[in-house]
Amino acid sequence: MSFNPQFARIGEVFVHLGTATEQQVNEAVLKQKNFGLKLGETLLKLGYVSEKDLLDALHLQLEYEIIKEDELLELDPNVVKLIPEPFAVENRVIAIHKKENSMIIAMTDPDNIVIQDSLQKLLSLNIIPMLIGDSVLSDTLEKYYKGIRTSSQVEDAVGNFEFVAVDEDENEITIDNKADADAPVVKLVNLIITEAIKSNTTDIHIEPLTNNTRVRFRIDGALREVMSPPIGLHAGMVSLIKVMSKLNIAERRLPQDGHISLKTSVKSVDVRVSIAPTVTGEKVVMRLLDKGEFGFSLTTLGFSQSDLDIFHKWIKRPYGITIVSGPTGSGKSTTLHAGLKEIKNIENNIVTVEDPVEYRLDGITQIEAKEKIGLTFGRALRSVLRQDPDIVLIGEIRDEETADIAIKFSLTGHLVFTTLHANDAPSTITRLVDIGIPAYLVASSLNLVLAQRLVRKICTNCIGDYTPTDAELIAAGITKEEAKEITFKKGKGCVHCNNTGFSGRTGIFEIIEVNSEVRKLIFAEENQDVIRDAALRNGMHSLHASGIDKMKQGLTTISEVIKLTVSDE
């Protein structure tokens, strides 16, 4: 007798498809009452089937079509919001498309007649159900209802906000004198910061354009536009941020820097504020620093096992300097703090001097330099010597004074960690000499130089094969013969990754161990190319090679490697 899925139980469908065994189905039958779930959901919870397996089985049994993720990328928010958010979240549904007298609704349980009846009464339309996975639905609901909430809040904030014309010499913008006239700007700034914190944003950009203000969030290293309030609100927003940062409201011609300490129900955040005058008005950039518990470890940063072993070896030495280099936002501080977290113990006195303190580490003395009150890096570091330190972290070598103190620390029996802005590991060494440190002192004190970058990881929900162009292969230094041995990957974009194709970041690294050969080259003041050749002979993997390895593992794309590294050719 042929198998008819419409007359079969869902467990039988799974067995028929080969996605679950009879034994697994029987186990799920016994456990589903405890879980309070349906059989298919129980199998999913137990890890015996995937969400796709569950959708395929329901499609066969119920004959409902499965919504394609591509169709979820550009839904009309005006259609989505026809179903109130609480109803959509509770009943696991989302409105897809209106067709004459009908509405297509994606549902995790399209066979639920009660929900269909409720939707029909709510919308006064016939309901055409489609199947959707629960995790896909959750991401889609968050994406669209968050946008709807944000849009409505911006509209509420700016609805009754009026400005009058001002003279070019007037310092303050004139606001219509109504009760709570400042409330719209306050609400808008609070909304921007709140949404940024929720989105794990590292930087907020608020910049004036010709006709509106552009608000962008830097998420996973890339900027995304999130809203565009009217340009008339811009001066009020900047003034409010200045007040919060204790800056001079009347000064609009010079750059200003400040900070805001925020507490939310979830976490505390330190916001570093930079305001710069531009031809269209003042631009605000706010860097968000999480003041919560440091959650990284060396094993989660993306090190290969060989590089991790090298880093472990040198951070446990009794003295000398370990330098991590790279541009702003490349994860230098994260790597060093993860290293400190690993080596801290009751026997060591670890002291850090930073500006700002980006991560709080329990059991470590952290000092924040404050230029405004005269607590410079140099002054703070000199005071550290009287604190009986074993290990010192210097947030950044900025000048000859800081570098000189770091060198002296390392030569007097201290282990020093620090960062430096440089393009790669070899140029980090020559940069120290350029700053003004004698080559013989650099050679005597350096233990390890690590250069790093952060590459975006491909979204695991929409990852697929990719064929690179000839131009990409040339830029990446890969021959066509080599390309045949590589399976290139790329994310096509989905609701999980906000249609970017990426989710999260991982590190790529370049490590130079300062052995006797490299030390002699530094003594001789050889250039960075000579030092690089020696390091490569001694087994160094370049940033580019590290990026290529990540690409071969299917973790990142060829475009990311090209964007962040230079070919070794």
Image (tube, rainbow, N blue to C red):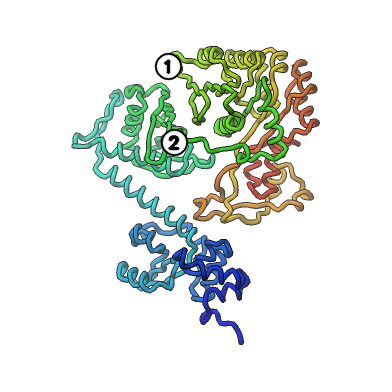
Give x and y (percent) for residue 232.
Answer: 31, 37
Which residue lies at the image location 24% right of the left edge and 38% below the top edge? 162
Secondary element type, mark 1: helix
Say whether disc 2 or disc 1 marks the residue closer to the N-terminus. 2
Which residue lies at the image location 45% right of the left edge and 13% below the top edge? 374
Q: Nearer the viewer, residue 131 or 114?
A: 114
Q: Which mark is residue 29?
A: none
Quadrant in the rendering for residue 288 = top left
Q: Nearer the viewer, residue 10 or 448?
A: 10
**Residue 101 visible:** no
**Residue 359 visible:** yes
User: In this image, 530 relative to 398: left or right?
Assistant: right
- Is residue 254 depicted above or below 201 in this figure? above
On the image, numbered disc 1 is attached to which residue? 372
- Is residue 198 depicted above or below 68 in this figure? above
Secondary element type, mark 2: strand
Q: Nearer the viewer, residue 546 or 500?
A: 546
User: In this image, 284 relative to 186: left or right?
Assistant: right
Q: Which mark is residue 205?
A: 2
Give x and y (percent) for residue 211.
Answer: 37, 40
- Is residue 59 depicted above or below 440 in this figure? below
How many numbered marks does the figure carry?
2
Q: For the N terminus, which image quadrant?
A: bottom right
Quadrant in the rendering for residue 231 = top left
- CA distance for labels 2 and 1: 25 Å
Give x and y (percent) for residue 282.
Answer: 39, 29
| Residue neighbourhood size for the residue with mark 2, other residues' Cα within 10 Å, grouped as few (<14), some (14–19), many (≥20) | many
- Is residue 506 depicted above or below 339 in this figure? below
User: In the image, what residue type sits under mark 1?
Assistant: Lys
